[in-house]
Image (cartoon, rainbow, N blue to C red):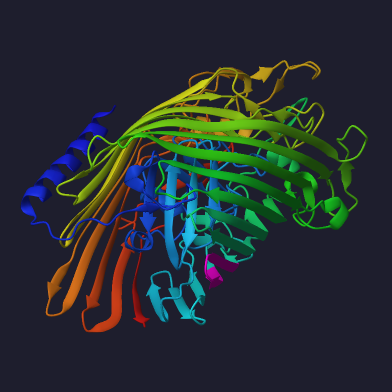
Amino acid sequence: MSGRFRNSVSLAALTVGIISVAQTAQAQIETVTVTAERRDVDLQKTTLAATVLTADDLDKKSVMGLTALQNAAPGITINDYGSANVFNMRGVGREAVDVEIPSGVAIYRDGVPTLAGYFQGEPYFDMAGIEVLRGPQGTLAGQSASGGALFIRTADPDTHGYRSSVQFGIGNYDATEGQFMVNAPLGDDAAIRIAFNHSDRGSMYKITGSFTGSPNERDLNNLRVGLAWNPGAWNIVLKTDIGQDDFGGNPVSTPGAPLFSIKLDDPMAYVDKSIRQVADVRYTFADGTSLRSLTGIQNVSTVNNLDADGGGPPPGIVFPAGPIVPAAINPTGHNAFRSQGNFFFYSEELDLVSPSDQRFRWVLGAFAERQVSLIPDYNVTGQDGFTFTGFSSGSDAFPFFATGWRMIEDDLAVFANTEYDITPDLTLETGLRGSYNGRKSTTSFTFGFGTTPPFIGIDTGAGGGPGTATSAGDYLDGKVALQWKPTEDDFVYLTGSRGHTVKGINIFPPHDVYRPVEVWNYEVGWKTSLFDDHMRTQIDAYYEDIGNYQAVFGLVIPGALVPDVSETRNAESRSKIWGIEASGQGQWGDFGLDFGAAYLNSKIGKFTDIINPFSVAPVQVAPLPAPPVVLGNPVAAAEAAAFGNNCDTGSGLVTLTGSKAPFSPEITANVGAQYAIHSGGVTVTPRADVSYASENQANLFACSLETIKARTLVNLQMRVESEDSPWWASLWMTNVADLKYVAAVQNIPPIYYAGPRRQFGIRIGRSFE
């Protein structure tokens, strides 16, 4: 463990010690509740390694959306590419962003699974809380929760009385925002809740060139309507979320170029339109047993167009005979990526849950889901699917290369989780989930070589049509845990759990199926209350043994002229990840403190005969004809020579063994503190939050071009309230030092996505009752 991590832990311990001596304790810290286990339980009494943030926590920590969550919870990273993201927990999630690659972190909204890894830009507003569960959650969260799960909960309507609130704000970059919420009873046992959020912002970039669109500008609009009806033993909640989130387009940079001063010369756009409907119906029997039905229907449509080379040089193209100089075949100088698609989700879960006050407690459940993903076939519809323009086409108006894609995925599962109190202080917990996952993927390819049609459709299927492949698998996940309560304040657990990320189908021919990731997790943890219940802490240590780790590498297609062709492969040996995590929350009268820290060590298994993208050394590869060909990427190799100081540019084919897990910093940490100052009926509460993530890689190659550098971010906030007025005001600032940093790296040669610059503003709001 590095000296920096030891110093951080020592500083946190010293701070806690000083506070405990200096403060006269008043209010104790509130109990934190989690719902992911299908019943409300105290976080301090569960075998979950989790960070739980209430609605108040989200506001205080400026967590307004998914990406900011990594600054408030240890052991996680979220690399945001706009419509897509790479979300890793404890080094497990996914290694690259491609639409056909499953994510190992499941994301639920109001109990309904979403398309993890995509379309998670919806802002957080009128929230109940967020639960970040680290480690395999296969029993209750299901397949592809091998790294962990995220449960996002919005506020439910309630029948306790009329309430409403409104807030608005302004900030730099011409930012404006507004929210309102109204909760109104409808008789004695029903209520309606309506919440709306709007935010807009100008660009943080200085952009020149012949681009179209509004890159990096924001215009986000979201509406939620909820109905609750609680007649007798019934509890029914219906919610509909409608969103139109316009992110303007995603500017990217390249090695050697400024992050925020970019020349773009292609159309820019990025808009997600979504509707999600959730029906949560629960009936509680006289003995306390409950039967619950949770139904979800979701539809997302997206358009995402960007300048794929960030104003830099177009990527290298490789023929079997060798590399071709990009400028020689690309008279336009353009390299645009245009995409759109529609995604549909239908899910149903049934839970039967025992009362919580029994010696033997259990949850029984069944789950079914269908996902339908549709990317248009340009050659058939004339619509951009995954479409590349420029390159050799001689025009940026027609595609050089386009991919249509359709996938239908079905999930079926039954599961059970039990707890049995062997003694009042010793409990055995077991869980088991049997599931089936089936996929059918159909891919088409179109090539264009002129300024007008016709285009050439390439049939890759066995029957001469589009390439169709299927995969199916049965999975068995679960956990076994011992819970020990040696004192009223202490909770110790020892657990072993297993989770899977499902197998997938390569989008490029021959459409090989790659194997599922299998994660075995062994963990010990201790949760306790300190200083007369004014501070609660969690500490855990884990070891993960991973089979079939999935990673994306370059692929050679004999005789084909295809940009950035890739394939997903499985590691040939097992991967190992271990780490230590700690977190705590404290409250001493007007002073509040929270912290989290995680250390991670990883060693990914063996991959042989991998194309070295940074090498231009010729390689003899059957069945390609002699002479040997260059398989690497000429632009990546040139960039490595110019800007990379540790890129392996030797052999054209390499073996990778023992690489660090991508997107997984060795150290992540966060700490926040606030103090309420009371004077003349006015309360002023200043707050500071600091987060740190150490250096990490964007893939398995050891190359500085693919390195995400260490960063420390500071957020400040000051809230002003009056005892005699329902109004409040908050001054806030994020990224106080205006750190200019690369937040995400994609592809080889890489394109860089910058993290948000310093933002500041004021919010004013009030409540009505």
Q: Residue furthest right?
A: 463
Q: Is residue 653 above or below residue 284?
A: above
- In the image: residue 630, left or right of residue 241: right
Q: Is residue 87 above or below residue 192?
A: above
In magenta stretch: residue 378 = no
The answer, for residue 241, to whether it is visible in the render is yes
Query: Where does the image place residue 558, in percent across and percent down from the top left?
Result: 80, 26
Q: Based on the displayed image, in which of its 4 quarters is residue 127 positioned?
A: bottom left
The answer, for residue 265, to whether it is visible in the render is no
- In this view, the residue in front, 593 or 334, is 593
Where's the C terminus, which quadrant?
bottom left
Q: Based on the displayed image, in which of its 4 quarters is residue 439 positioned?
A: top right
Q: How many marks?
A: 0
In magenta stretch: residue 225 = yes
- In the image: residue 688, left or right of residue 450: left
Span colored in magenta? 219-243
Main SS of residues in magenta: strand
Query: Where does the image place residue 170, in percent across and percent down from the top left?
Result: 39, 75
